[in-house]
Image (spheres, rainbow, N blue to C red):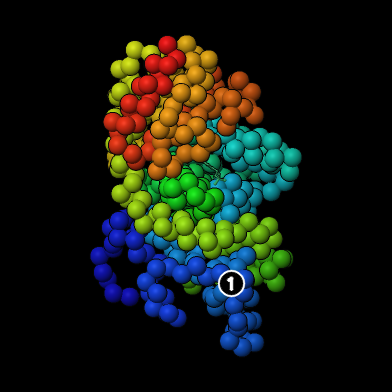
C-alpha cells in the first residue's frame, strides 16, 4: 500500500470502501439482491467456512452492498472493522450479548435512549443479565459497581434526550483500569461531529436509522470495532475470542484473525450472532443508508447551525420556561460540549413550555412544518413529547434519571431554513398561551 495522506471525512463519506463495480463498471454502489454466492470450487468453499479466506457465502452473514457501507462507516470512525445490522436495537443487543452472558453483568450510564433502557432493565433481566447503572456525571461510581463478572461499560455519546455530554476520558480510563472494554452509542452525534474511538472508546454503535441514513427512509444499525481492546491480554476472561469456539468447529477467533487485525470481536458477531439470530440489514437498506451517508458531512453542520438558532430563539421566548441544548452557554454540560463537541452540539434539543405537560401537548398539536412522530435525525424537523411516548414505559423516577420531565418537548431540528422552523415553533407556542 502506498503511504498516501488519509482522506478527509467528506471524501470518505463519498468514496470509502468502494471501487467502480468490478463486474459492470457501475459507478454507484449496486444493490446486490442475492441470497447466496457461487463458490469457485470445493476448496474455496471450505476456506470461506474456516475463515482462512474472506469472501461471500450467504447474505445473512455478508453482502457486497452492505460491505461498502461497513467499510465506509469503519473508515469514517477510524475503526478496524464494522458490521451492519437490521436496526440500532439489533446492533446494541448483538454488541452486548456477544460479551455478556447469563449470570454476568455490565455497567451502563443512566442517560439512555428509551428503547435501550427497556432492553437493559427488562429483557436482559429476563435472560439473566444484570445491568448496573452509574450517573454519567460521576464516572467514579463505576469503581463500586464492577466485580469479577462485569463485562463492559456502556454509554451514549450524547444522552438522548437528556443531552448530557459524558466525560469520555474519565469513563474510558476507569473502564480500562478494570480491564473492561467501553461501548458507546454514537447515534446522536455521528462520525461527522464526534469520533468516539479518538476518545478511548473500543466499540461504537449506531442506529443508522437516524442521521446517518438521514432521510427517515430505512431502519438499520451498525457496530464499529476499534481494534484497540486487547482481548488476548486476559485470555481467561474472554473465552469468546481466546478459546476454541464450540459452535465454529473449534476456531480460536483471536488467533485465526490476528494476521488480518484485532477484529475477533466484530467477526465473532458476524459469524455467530448474525448466523444464529439473522438480524441482518437488507442490501436495499444498506443502499439507502449509503445515499444518506454521502452527504452526512454537509447535513450535520446545517443541523447544528439550525439547532443553535432554534435554541437561542426558544431561550428568549416569553412562553418557554427552560431550554436544554448543550451548545447554549446556559447548559449544565456546555463546558464538556466545548471540550468534546467541537464540531457542533447536534440537532436534538428539549424545552419546557410555561403551562407544563398540557401546554406541551397543545404545542405539539399545533406545529405545521414540524412533524409529530417518534424518530430523530430526519432532514425534516420532528417533535415529540417523550414522557407520554418514547419514555412512557419508564417509571417517573426512571424518566427523571434519563432526563425526561413531564413538560419536556423534544425537537430534532431538521435542515430546512432556520427562519421557517422558528416561525412554525413560534406560532405553535402562541397557540398554547
Ligand atoms: C433510535 C435509537 C436507537 C434504536 O435504533 P433503531 O434503529 O430504531 O433500532 C438506539 N440508540 C439511540 C440513541 C437512538 O436514537
For this view, does 336 lie left or right of residue 88? left
The answer to whether residue 240 shows anywhere in this view is no
Residue holding disc 1? 34
292, above or below 362, in the image: below
Which residue: 50% across, 24% down?
365
SS state under label 1: loop
Which residue: 64% across, 81% down?
46
Q: Quadrant of the C terminus?
A: top left
Q: Give 226 or 27, whichever is nearer the viewer.
A: 27
Which residue: 46% across, 56% down?
289
31, above or below 335, in the image: below
Q: Give 317 or 159, whichever is nearer the viewer.
A: 317
For this view, does 353 lie left or right of residue 253? left
Q: Residues within 10 Å of mark 1 (few under 14, many from 20)?
A: few
Which residue: 46% across, 34% down?
371
Q: Give 359 or 329, whichever is nearer the viewer.
A: 359
Residue 86: x %, y % from top left: 58, 54
Residue 260: x %, y % from top left: 48, 71
Residue 232: x %, y % from top left: 55, 60
Q: Quadrant of the N terminus?
A: bottom left
Amino acid at each position: 500500500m502506498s503511504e498516501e495522506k488519509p482522506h478527509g471525512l467528506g471524501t470518505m463519506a463519498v468514496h470509502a470502501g468502494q471501487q467502480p463495480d468490478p463486474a459492470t463498471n457501475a459507478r454507484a454502489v449496486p444493490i446486490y439482491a442475492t441470497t447466496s454466492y457461487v463458490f469457485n470450487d470445493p476448496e474455496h468453499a471450505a476456506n470461506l467456512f474456516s475463515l482462512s479466506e474472506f469472501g461471500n457465502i450467504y447474505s445473512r452473514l455478508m453482502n457486497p452492498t452492505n460491505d461498502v457501507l461497513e467499510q465506509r462507516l469503519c473508515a469514517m470512525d477510524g475503526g478496524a472493522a464494522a458490521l451492519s445490522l437490521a436496526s440500532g436495537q439489533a446492533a446494541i443487543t448483538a454488541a452486548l450479548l456477544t460479551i455478556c452472558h447469563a449470570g454476568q453483568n455490565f455497567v451502563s450510564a443512566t442517560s439512555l435512549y428509551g428503547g435501550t433502557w427497556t432492553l437493559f432493565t427488562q429483557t436482559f433481566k429476563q435472560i439473566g443479565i444484570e445491568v448496573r447503572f452509574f450517573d454519567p456525571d460521576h464516572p467514579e461510581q463505576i469503581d463500586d459497581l464492577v466485580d469479577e463478572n462485569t463485562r463492559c461499560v456502556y454509554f451514549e455519546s450524547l444522552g438522548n434526550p437528556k443531552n448530557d455530554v459524558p466525560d469520555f476520558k474519565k469513563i474510558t480510563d476507569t473502564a480500562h483500569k478494570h480491564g473492561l472494554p467501553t461501548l458507546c452509542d454514537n447515534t446522536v452525534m455521528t462520525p461527522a461531529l464526534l469520533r468516539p474511538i479518538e476518545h478511548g472508546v473500543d466499540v461504537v454503535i449506531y442506529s443508522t436509522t437516524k442521521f446517518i441514513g438521514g432521510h427517515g427512509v430505512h431502519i438499520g444499525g451498525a457496530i464499529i470495532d476499534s481494534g484497540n481492546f486487547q482481548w488476548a491480554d486476559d485470555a481467561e476472561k474472554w473465552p469468546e475470542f481466546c478459546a476454541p469456539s464450540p459452535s465454529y468447529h473449534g476456531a480460536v477467533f483471536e488467533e485465526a484473525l490476528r494476521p488480518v487485525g484485532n477484529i475477533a470481536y466484530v467477526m465473532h458477531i458476524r459469524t455467530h450472532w448474525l448466523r444464529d439470530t439473522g438480524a441482518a440489514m437488507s442490501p436495499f437498506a444498506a443502499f439507502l443508508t449509503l445515499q444518506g451517508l454521502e452527504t452526512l458531512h454537509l447535513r450535520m453542520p446545517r443541523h447544528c447551525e439550525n439547532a443553535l438558532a432554534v435554541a437561542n430563539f426558544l431561550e428568549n421566548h416569553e412562553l418557554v420556561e427552560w431550554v436544554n441544548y448543550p451548545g447554549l452557554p446556559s447548559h449544565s454540560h456546555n463546558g464538556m460540549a466545548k471540550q468534546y463537541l467541537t464540531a457542533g452540539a447536534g440537532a436534538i434539543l428539549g424545552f419546557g413550555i410555561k403551562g407544563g405537560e398540557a401546554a406541551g401537548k397543545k404545542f405539539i398539536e399545533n406545529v405545521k412544518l414540524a412533524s409529530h412522530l417518534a424518530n430523530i435525525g430526519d432532514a425534516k424537523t420532528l417533535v415529540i413529547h417523550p414522557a407520554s411516548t418514547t419514555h412512557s414505559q419508564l417509571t417517573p423516577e426512571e424518566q427523571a434519571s434519563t432526563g425526561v420531565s413531564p413538560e419536556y418537548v423534544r425537537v430534532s431540528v431538521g435542515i430546512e431554513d432556520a427562519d421557517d422552523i422558528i416561525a412554525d415553533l413560534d406560532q405553535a407556542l402562541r397557540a398554547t398561551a
